[in-house]
Image (cartoon, rainbow, N blue to C red):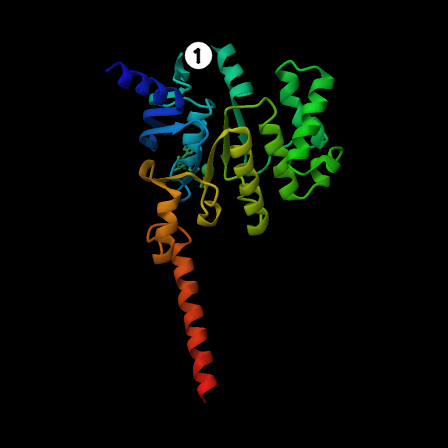
Amino acid sequence: MAGTATTETEIAQQVVVRTKDVKKVYKMGKVEVHALKGITVEIEAGEYISIMGPSGSGKTTLFNMVGALDKPTSGQVYIDEVDVAQLDAYELAWLRCRKIGYIFQTFNLIPVMSALENVTLPMTFAGLTTDEARNKGMDLLDQVGLADRYDHKPFELSGGQQQRVAIARAMANSPSIILADEPTGNLDLATGKEIIQLLGEMNRKEHVTIITATHDIKMLSASDRIVWMRDGALAKIERRENLDIQIGSIEGDAEGGVEASLRGTGEREKEESTDESAEQ
Ligand SMILES: Nc1ncnc2c1ncn2[C@@H]1O[C@H](COP(=O)(O)OP(=O)(O)OP(=O)(O)O)[C@@H](O)[C@H]1O
Ligand SMILES: [Mg+2]
């Protein structure tokens, strides 16, 4: 029995994010929007999780709860098994500064600051000296492939480069969790895939837990698990390897699936017509 207890403790220690029946109701005058309808999920340390769901399904709302940026109407969010609702203002600030790195769709860099200054800003809040911050900032910019752009302001960088700076900034205080809300939403497909690859590298090398939201099935390659949301609820959670198997037969309820299936049909038709013309 003692052996079982140890195993349970070990498993419990690995859970970095736990939500318990999280509900969020936005009140708009007399109208209530039930944005989250009871989300219960566990995310283990070191996982790469993608949250998939159509617009309005509650992805950003869930991020705001997990990132301690907003409070659930009911239910609990635990980060490292600590109930976020029990934290005082100082502890919350510490959590947001040290424990969690945030990445947004629109990069949200400070326009008047250079890439390096953007990356080192959270380090300054965390109490690093200027030299320490500069060294760590340059190291992070190097990791995201932008050491030679350290002095560029955001408007002197491409969208993909800006998002790389945002990733370096999110890593500034060596967080245990990165929350990335549609980090590829403003990027073309190839650049988006590079960003996902980079997040995957950070996940593997730095062992940071990544939780990312996306609309796009083409952005799931680095994921360990996919959490599907629909209308404020969890539709299903599945491991990526299972999804890979389904992709062959076209995943009926996944966005992009229908498009892929239509494209497949189009290509077959083209091939058939080519065959016909060859015969003639
Ligand atoms: N501050 C708010 N006040 C009122 N309603 C809100 C607020 N924020 C979000 N909502 C509503 O809650 C629901 C969930 O919104 P949310 O932003 O979480 O969706 P999402 O899945 O992130 O969508 P998208 O993919 O478009 O970013 C939507 O119906 C939205 O209109
Ligand atoms: Mg959103």
| Residue 236 sits in quarter | top left
Q: Residue 24: x and y, percent?
A: 35, 27
Q: Residue furthest bottom?
A: 280
Q: Name the image quarter holding residue 175.
A: top right
Q: Is mark 1 within 8 Å of ligand 1?
A: no
Residue 4 position in % (x across, y down) = 27, 19
Give neighbour class at mark 1: few <14, some 14-19, many 20+ (Cα, 10 Å).
some
Q: Is residue 76 visible?
A: no
Residue at image point 58% right, 27% down: 171
Q: Residue at x 45, y 74 (%)?
A: 270
Q: In the figure, 2 relative to 226: above or below?
A: above
Residue 150 higher or lower than 8, as above or below:
below
Q: Position of residue 58 (x, y in %)?
A: 39, 36
Dot 1 falls on a residue whose secondary structure is: loop
Residue 213 vertical placement versus 280 (above, below): above
Dividing the image into 4 quarters, which one contains the N terminus? top left
- Report the side of 221 relative to 119 (left or right): left
Residue that carries the numbered disc 1 in the rendered image: 87
x and y, in percent, of residue 85 in the image = 40, 15
Residue 10 is left or right of residue 136, and the answer is left
- Who's the residue at 64% across and 43% down the image? 159
For the C terminus, the image quarter is bottom left
Question: Label 1 is placed on what type of residue?
Answer: Leu
Q: From the viewer's perspective, tell me whether residue 129 is left or right of residue 217.
A: right
| 4 or 257: nearer the viewer | 4
Q: Is residue 257 visible?
A: yes
Q: Give the residue at the far left of this rendering.
A: 1
- The residue drawn where x is 71% and y is 23% is 135
Q: Quadrant of residue 249?
A: bottom left
